[in-house]
Amino acid sequence: MSTNERMQSVPEAEAQAAKMADARDDARAGREELVRVRGLVKHFPVTGSDDVVRAVDGVAFEILRGETLGLVGESGCGKSTVGRCLLRLIEPTRGEISFAGQDVLALSGGDLRRLRREMQIIFQDPYASLNPRLKVRDIVGEPLVIHGIGSKPERRERVADLLKKVGLDPDYMNRYPHEFSGGQRQRIGIARALALNPKLIVADEPVSALYTRALLSAIPIPDPTRRRERIVLKGDVPTPINPPTGCRFHTRCPEAIPECSRIDPDLREISPGHTVACIRVPGWTQAPTNA
């Protein structure tokens, strides 16, 4: 069996992904933009050194109302940092973030608090994100208290309803976090994030089923007579303190050429709704910068 035959399912899946992208573009037409991020950078100082950890370096994306965006990457690549910068749980080094037309980075005090009513986060660690000294009713109801929503009985009723929505018994509201499994704790965190009916929820967990060639090549074929050639990403993730020159991914990319180590590609729209930062993609050189 030839390599092309073994890899046949990958282009088929890529073609399917292209169809899904076209359908997504049709669905996006005429819808309001909720979030816009441009040139987002977050560097963390290294204690006792002039070096910085380049956790996030030039991220750009937008999210429309009712849309879900999956941010995919290896452990330590900055996904959580992007989400926390979006909500200003940590301050970006530079960049632009707008939410429903408002400049998020220009807000402070009461204006920022009101904005956070519309933006909530589900933290990745269900153990560290729940206060062990508070009962579930206080954890889930805390956003309602902070924003002065409802009376005490109304808040209790809202908490009971939220617990039902995430598949937990409302009577659990009188228990403490240590009485729950990890999965149940995550449900409590989800209930808390839903309490204010936010317009945006940042779910700080890895997601699957997004189409990259390396992931697709790992999917088993339900036919014992066929084999698929695995695309293995070699090497380790580069250190964010001293990243490689040019494209940050070129040291592990199977498609890399010498120019990839010299050119730091910016994000460009090569077709409607399809942006890439890779000089190897046909059309990238001629495409306008996604400013």
Image: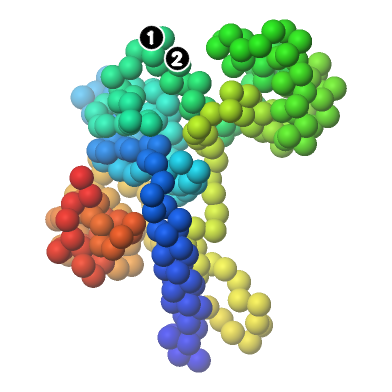
Q: Quadrant of residue 231?
A: bottom left
| Alpha carbon separation for disc pair 1 and 2 | 6 Å
* 201 lies left or right of 94: right
What's the residue at 54%, 37% (across, down)?
Answer: 203
Q: Quadrant of residue 14?
A: bottom left
Within 10 Å of disc 1 (Cα), the crowding (few <14, some 14-19, many 20+) is: few
Along the line of sight, the residue nearer the viewer: 269 or 90: 269
What's the residue at 64%, 21% (across, down)?
Answer: 130
Residue 53 vs 285, above or below: the answer is above
> Outermost residue, front direction?
30
Q: Which mark is residue 47?
A: none
Number of numbered callouts drawn: 2
Along the line of sight, the residue nearer the viewer: 234 or 118: 118
The residue carrying mark 1 is: 109
Q: What amino acid is labelled 1 in the image?
A: Gly
What's the residue at 83%, 29% (across, down)?
Answer: 169
Q: Position of residue 288 (x, y in %)?
A: 17, 56
Within 10 Å of disc 2 (Cα), the crowding (few <14, some 14-19, many 20+) is: some
* 142 lies left or right of 41: right
Disc 2 element: helix
> Outermost residue, bottom direction?
1
The residue carrying mark 2 is: 113
Q: Is residue 62 visible?
A: yes
For the C terminus, the image quarter is top left
Along the line of sight, the residue nearer the viewer: 139 or 74: 139
Residue 231 vs 134, above or below: the answer is below
Q: Position of residue 87 (x, y in %)?
A: 42, 26
Q: Position of residue 44 (x, y in %)?
A: 31, 26
Q: What amino acid is labelled 2 in the image?
A: Arg
